[in-house]
Image: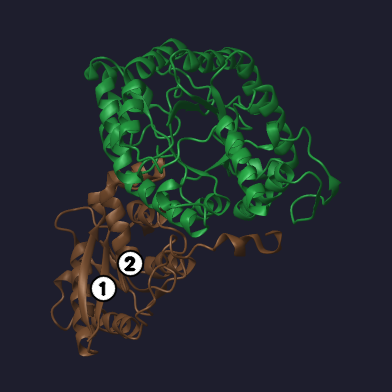
Chain colours: A green, B brown
Amino acid sequence: MQFGIFTVSDITTDPTTGRTPSEAERIQAVVAIAKKAEEVGLDVFALGEHHNPPFFSSSPTTTLAYIAAQTSTLQLSTSTTLITTNDPVKIAEDYAMLQHLAGGRVDLMMGRGNTGPVYPWFGKDVRDGIPLAVENYALLRRLWDTEVVDWSGRYRTPLQGFTSTPRPLDGVPPFVWHGSIRSPQIAEQAAYYGDGYFANHIFWPEEHTQRMVEFYRGRFAHHGHGDADQAIVGLGGQVFMRKNSQDAVREFRPYFDNAPVYGHGPSLEDFSRETPLTVGSPQQVIERTLGFRDYVGDYQRQLFLLDHAGLPLKTVLEQLDLLGEEVVPVLRREFAALRPAHVPDAPTHTARVAARRSGAAAEELTVR
Amino acid sequence: MTTRTLAVLSAGLSTPSSTRLLADRLTAATVKALRQRGDDATVEVVELREHARALADHLVTGFPSTALRGAIDTVVGADGLIAVTPVFSASYSGLFKTFIDVLDPDALTGRPTLLGATAGSARHSLVLEHAMRPLFAYLRAVPVPTAVFAAAEDWGDGDGGALAPRIQRAAGELADLVAGRPATARPSDPFADFVPFDQLLGDQA
C-alpha cells in the first residue's frame, strides 16, 4: 500500500498572523514539502492543477519534473489533471516526457475540475463536462497505447497518422486514476478501463464514499478486470496532529474556521464527525485511518491533505515528521497484515513493466 | 390498498407555529381524502427550523449533514408533497428557499404538491401565486390548482369560515393526483441510472 500527500496549491492568508505568502514562497514551499515527503518515508506526492488565483499550480509537469530531479523514490502524481479542458495530445506528450525524466515514477489522476470559468477560458462548454472527459480520455489512451493514431471526435481537430512523442517509457504508459467526488459516471469510466478510482473523501460523509467505491468495484468486475476486491482504490484524507490531541485542536481551529473551502460553516467538531477529517494525536489518526478499510475494503493508496488553508511551511513539515515517523509505519504494517494475497498492491511502473513482460511471454506460449 | 407517502415541509419558525398548524390541517385533510379514494398514507414531517444551521453549512461545504440528508431524502422520496412557508418580505422565507436550493434541480420533477403560506394579514395571500407557484413550476413539480393561504384572522373563523373549504378542496386535488400516480414514479438513483461506458463511448469504442 502507498501512502502520501496531495496538495491543491492554494495561496491562503495565515489567519493567525494575517500574512499571505508570495507565489515565489509558496512554489518553493511545495518543492520543500515534496522533498520532505520522500525524506520521512512517504511514497507519493500529488499536485493539483488550477488556472486561477489563489492557486499557483497551472503547470504541474514542470513542478513535478523539478521535484523528480531532486528525489529518488517518490512517486509523482496529480490531484487532479483536467481531462476536460486540456488537450489530450498535450497530456499524452507532457506526462510521457515526465515519465522518462522521472524514471517511471509517475502516475496521474484525471478530474473534471470544479471551476466553471476554466471551461470557457480554454474554449470549452461546462455543460459538456462528462462527454469531454469521455472523449478526451479515450483519445489519450489511443495516443499512449497505439503508435500511429488516426482519430476524429467532437471536441478537437482530427488526427491523421499522428504519433505522440516521446512514447511511454518501456511501452507502459503512466497508471491512471480517476477522481470524482460525486459522479458515478466517472467511477464507471475508471472501471471500464480497469484504471484506479480515487475518492476525494474529504468533503463528503463516509457513506457516500462507501457507495461510490462499492459501485466502482462492482463495475470493475463487470468489465472483466478481476474480482471486485481486486479493483484499485485510492482515498483522500485530512489530518492535523500534535502529540497531545488538545494542542492539535487548539492550533488547527483558526485554520479550519477560515479555510477557503469549508470555513465559516460547520464547526470543527461537526466536520470531524461528518467527514474523515481527524484533528488529534497520531494514535487517533492511525485508528481513524485503519477504519477506512471497514467501509471501502482493502485499498491501494492513501493520500493526506496537510498543506492548505494558510498553514505555515514549518507547521506542514512538522506534520510530515509526525506522519512519517509515527503514523505511516504503523498503518503500513497493519494494512499489510490485513490484506489478503489476491488483492493487488498499488501499481508502480516497475511492477507494470514486469506484468507486461510476463503477459507477453504467456501469450507467446499460448500461440505456440 | 396502496400506501402512499406524504412529505410535509414546514418552514415556520416559532413554536407553536401557525405555519405548522396549517401544514397539519392540510395533511389531515389529504390523508382523509386519500382514504376516501382507497389509499392509505404515511406522513413524514420535516420542520426546517431543526435544520437551519445544517442548511447554512450545506451552502458552505456542498454536502448535507446526516440529519439533513434524511430530511432531503424524505422530501425527494415522497409520493406527494405539502409545502408551507411563512411570508417574509413579500415572498417565501429564506429558510424555505435555502432548502429548495440544496435539492437537485430535478429532484421534484412531476411531484404532486400542495402549496401553503401563512402571514399576519390577507394582504400577503398572492405570494402563493407570485412566488411559490413559479418556484415549483421551475422545479417541474405539479402544484395543485388550489393553494391555501391562512392569515392570522382565519384562525378565529368559525366552521363557516373560508379556510376549511379551501383546505378540503386543495386536499382533494392533491389526493386525486397522488392516488392516480403510478407506483413506479420514484426519484432516480444515480447508481442505478448511470450509462454503461461502452454506450457512452459510442463509436469511439
Within 10 Å of disc 2 (Cα), the crowding (few <14, some 14-19, many 20+) is many
Residue under the point 67% across and 64% down? B202
Q: Quadrant of the N terminus of chain A?
A: top left
* Residue A45 x/y as whole percent: 52, 25
- Which residue lies under the disc numbered 1? B5
Q: How many numbered callouts?
A: 2
* Residue A131 x/y as whole percent: 64, 55
Q: Are marks 1 and 2 in contact (CB under 8 Å)?
A: yes
Label 1: chain?
A: B
Q: Which residue is the extreme one toward the right?
A: A161
| Relative horizontal placement of residue A77, taking residue A231 as reference (left or right) | right
Q: Is residue A177 above or below residue B204?
A: above
- Counting residues from the N terminus, which is met first, the one under dot 1 or under dot 2? 1
Residue under the point 61% across and 26% down? A57
Secondary structure at badge 2 equals loop
Tell if the residue under mark 1 belongs to the same chain as the one under mark 2.
Answer: yes
Label 2: chain?
A: B
| Relative horizontal placement of residue B191, taking residue B29 as reference (left or right) | right
Front-most of residues B145 and A74? A74
- Residue A31, by quadrant, is top right
| Relative horizontal placement of residue A217, taking residue B114 as reference (left or right) | right
* Residue A307 x/y as whole percent: 46, 22
Residue under the point 41% across and 70% down? B129
- Which residue lies under the disc numbered 2? B77
Front-most of residues A174 and B9? A174
Residue type at numbered disc 1: Thr
Q: Is residue A47 above or below residue A250?
A: below
Q: CA distance from mark 1 to mark 2?
A: 8 Å
Any part of residue A331 in sight: yes
Within 10 Å of disc 1 (Cα), the crowding (few <14, some 14-19, many 20+) is many
Residue type at numbered disc 2: Gly
